[in-house]
Amino acid sequence: MADERIPFATHAESTVLGADEIVLNMGPQHPSTHGVLRVKLRLDGEKVIGSECVIGYLHRGVEKIAEHRSYQQFAPYVDRMDYVAAVSNGLGYCEAVEKLLGAEAPPRARVIRVILTELQRIASHLFWLGTHALDIGALTPLFYCLREREEILKIFEKYCGARLTTHAFRIGGLQYEAYDELEKDVERFCKPFDKRVDEYESLLTENRIWVGRTKGIGILTAAEAIDYGASGPVIRASGVKWDIRKAMPYAAYDQYKFEIPTGKNGDTYDRYIVRLEEMRQSRLICLQAIENIPAGPIMGKVGKVLKPPPGEVYHAIEAPKGELGYYIVSDGTTQPYRVRIRPPSLINLEAFDKMIRGHLVADVVAIIGTLDIVLGEVDR
Amino acid sequence: MHAVIQYLISIWVPLVCALVIVGVLPLVTGYIVLMERKVMADMQARLGPMRVGPHGLLQPIADAVKLLIKEDIIPDEADKAIFWIAPLISVTAGMLAMSALAIGPWFQIADLNVGLLFIVGISALGIFGIVLGGWSSNSHYSLLGALRSAAQLVSYETAAGMAVVGALLLAGTLSTREIVTAQGDYGTWFIFAAPVGFFIYVVASIAETNRAPFDLPEAESELVAGYMTEYSGFRWALYFLAEYTNMVVVASIATTLFLGGWLRPFAGTPAFNFLDYFPSALMIFVGAYCLYRAPKQPVKVQQLFMMVLGLAFFGVALILAAPLIGRVNDMLPGLKPGLHGAFWFLLKVGSYIYLFMWLRFTFPRYRFDQLMRLGWQFLIPLSIVNVMGIGLALVLHRQWGWSHWTAFPLTTALTLLVAGWLGWAGEKKDKEHVFVGES
Amino acid sequence: MANDPEEKQPSASSPSEPSAPKPSASAGEPVSKPAAPPAAAAKPPAPKAPAGAPPPRPPAAPAPPKEGPVALDNDLVKRYKEKFGPAILEAWVDRKQAILVVARELLAEIAVYSRDDEKFDWLSDLTALDWPKREKRFDIVLNMYSFEKNERLRLKAQASADERVPSVQGIWATANWMEREVYDMFGVVFEGHPDLKRILLPDEWQGYPLRKDYDILTQDTAWVRENLGIESGQ
């Protein structure tokens, strides 16, 4: 048991033909390692008998930077971690600091936060779906997904002027009032969106090749998922019905009805199904949220200079990739004493070695894809 | 005098044909790539290349120039001589296979009596280029790609070969020319006599040419570019050329064997003679579309280009229409089958390649073990059953005097039954053998 | 600021620069202080319905008037104390989040107990803090979550620079990389980790960037020069 956790066990394993095993370096420049992940694979023929992830190529020392910036100054940095879901990162950070301050955002701000974050979840899942399908060889879904994602990015652009690294939220609420047609835009996007998801499903869900490539691949049982600290869709596909939005609601999630989709087998196919269903649920949340956006201020009472009382807080949100946690320690000054970011991508990636052993090279990309990692977040 | 002309024809016609193939094929390949990109773009809700020339029509030329002037990198650790020569083997094999193909009754380099055997054999040699290139690159990705390619070719060549055998049983000859003639004599294309064989050939030929969903040797997302990973510039372009040449070759084989070669649809039925106007009509349509789009081009040069293009299509339409004029036909009786035959042949080849593209943009990629299972457990048994089925039909037809219309549907139904059973059994076995990662 | 000065976390009162930090574990504060402030009451560890039920600690609840760590004494802490006695050095609640400061030597045992008996079966995060003025400068922080109770608990163990911390890698597989990251960034060595090497930085890198005495402009100049061929990464 302990042995199998050593990623690159050095003792010789007997190979089937007694042939030499080869070590294949996948990445950091590789079309489907989703950035600069490098995986060292030990192969017996095409079978993977061991792997080691080498990360850090995108390490920018975000946590160190945080200790030298004021609380507000650091907020844009978090967008650069999971740059596919920048809004979610910002939400987690702003709420963590608000918690540290003992402040809270006004109801209107919280609802708008929910709308944008859920749109971001859809966008992130769309991007995941497209690239995951591309990894497995289906070229076309990517462009359909990008087409829909574009609509979401346009909403972001209209709201705050940025598309990717939005810095949409501020500590204590929002800087910008929702623009006039926000509700209409969101509705226009959400109303037909479930048909669009059906469209992706018609390309993939029952496709024999797709099923063959994803079913039974990279199985993570519930116990293993817990052991490996997996979160988000990865742990839900393993059958653990746990979503921080439900378990410990933040922002305004307690006001909305939605389901937590779960899988049974914890394989790549289940993770695909779970993420698709999550998109549908996010759409429902958005539709509920635009029904009733409370009036009122958008900025809570926080000072211009943030000096949280000494102490510490751990605040986690359900980012598209999983539990995104901020552990912030304050020493009473304007700069955080320590900001630890718990990146879901990194922790989910840890299970990679467990999932890949015994599979073939082709499954490596399927499993990297299904974990939905963003290297900006893995390396920070 | 007559003897001299005959002699010149026997020497010069093949030479000219060979020059045309060698000279034009790279260009054609370039335009197949452009067509592929355009088709892909259309299926993916985007435009595709639009920058070089109107609607990106000059893109292939720009690409070719780019590839020619790119740096040709040979890795330090590579086996230089083999690395150098490997792409040439692939291209040569592909081009050589073209030599026995009959693109219309006029256009053929050599009518070999072992024609099809020659084509199948030579085109299979292209795998040497891939394996040697992958091996000599001294890179793991290349090696894996090369090995995959070799295994894949061996597996699917068998199925493809058996599918070809089915059609050959019907034709009773190996000469490409006579195969087409035989289909004319039968009054039906062999695809209708042996639909299962055609299906097997389609699948196997996709796998043989390493096209998606069987593009494992160059699976971009897994092996970067497979056996071509270390290649760059012109040598890379040669591999590309070889791949598309092979596509043309397998499409031509399929056209010759199953789709009636250069024969017009319903060639023997006078009621369908109006189809003779189809080639000209199609060209006029394309030309008219070019003229219609011409004023919408942003630049004067492009407008001019589109006009010239449209007029060129009209010209082609005229040439194609010429044999329909009674007097011309009387003067040059060979003109109509020559021109129209080439047109129909190329149209069929184009449709076949379009099918390849369609499949490529629709399906995800098979995994290696799945590919092997499909090949060995489904296609090869099925292709053998298919041959037996066709044999049975021929016995019923020739010995026992059954009509075509009963013998072939009957054996096809039997073969389909076997196919269903094979699929069901394979599925069941798959369920028992769930591929689970061991830890 | 916080409720009472003496209830604050060791050395949390001081920013990194001024004033000598308190000796940590020796604080010997009245951990079982009965007067738990209202904030603590809001965090009963009584088992709750499984995930999905209304949460025990809605973060959106009205904030208490004062923030800061206060001592915690409830059933959970009592159970831990019963089991491990003096190894549970302190117990805090800060922003309604429970924190146990435990003895470094028993960290692994306490982790096993937390996972198996208290059902904090999911290690959400493992990290470290650096308090350079303190005698035991590092805090190893484990954030655990219980699916059953829908609660989080934070364990802290203190270690000086040359002390080894027992690895919890065998208890939660996820701790493997997190401990490597702590080693990478702080230089804390984990006893019993099978593969303790740098994870984000290059293997040959000198220095531990998240230590407070490692300036933000500092870098391993020799490494940069040798491997990147440039004078400085700035």
Image (cartoon, coloured by chain):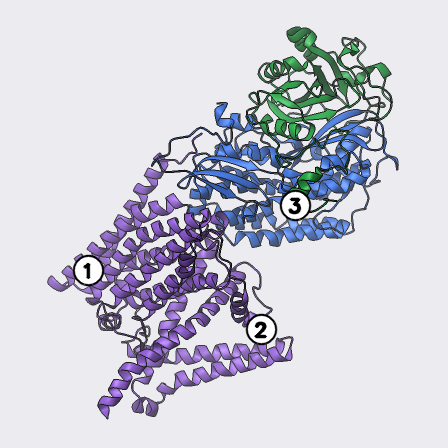
Mark 1 residue type:
Ala
Q: Chain A shown in which color? A: blue
Q: Which of the chains bears the disc numbered 2? A: B
Chain letter, purple in picture: B
Looking at the rendering, which quadrant does residue A63 occupy?
A: top right
Picture coordinates of residue B297 (x, y %)?
Answer: 62, 75
Q: Report if the CB atoms under discs 2 and 3 are less than 8 Å apart.
A: no
Looking at the rendering, which quadrant does residue A11 occupy?
A: top left
Chain letter, green in picture: C
Q: Is residue C159 above or below residue A162?
A: above
Q: Which of the chains bears the disc numbered 3? A: C
Is the residue at mark 2 from the same chain as the one at mark 1? yes
The residue lying at 66 percent from left, 53 percent from top is: A151
Mark 3 residue type:
Leu
Q: Is residue A211 above or below residue C73?
A: below
Which label number is shown at residue B407? Answer: 1
For label 2, the crowd category at 10 Å Cα-Cα, with few meaning under 14, some 14 to 19 and many 20 or more, is some
For label 3, the crowd category at 10 Å Cα-Cα, with few meaning under 14, some 14 to 19 and many 20 or more, is few
- Work out whether residue B221 can be spotted: yes
Of the numbered discs 2 and 1, the one sitting upstream in the chain is: 2
Q: Which residue is mark 3?
A: C228
Q: Which residue is mark 2?
A: B53
Spatial separation of the CA atoms under disc 2 and disc 3: 43 Å
Picture coordinates of residue C221 (x, y %)?
Answer: 71, 39
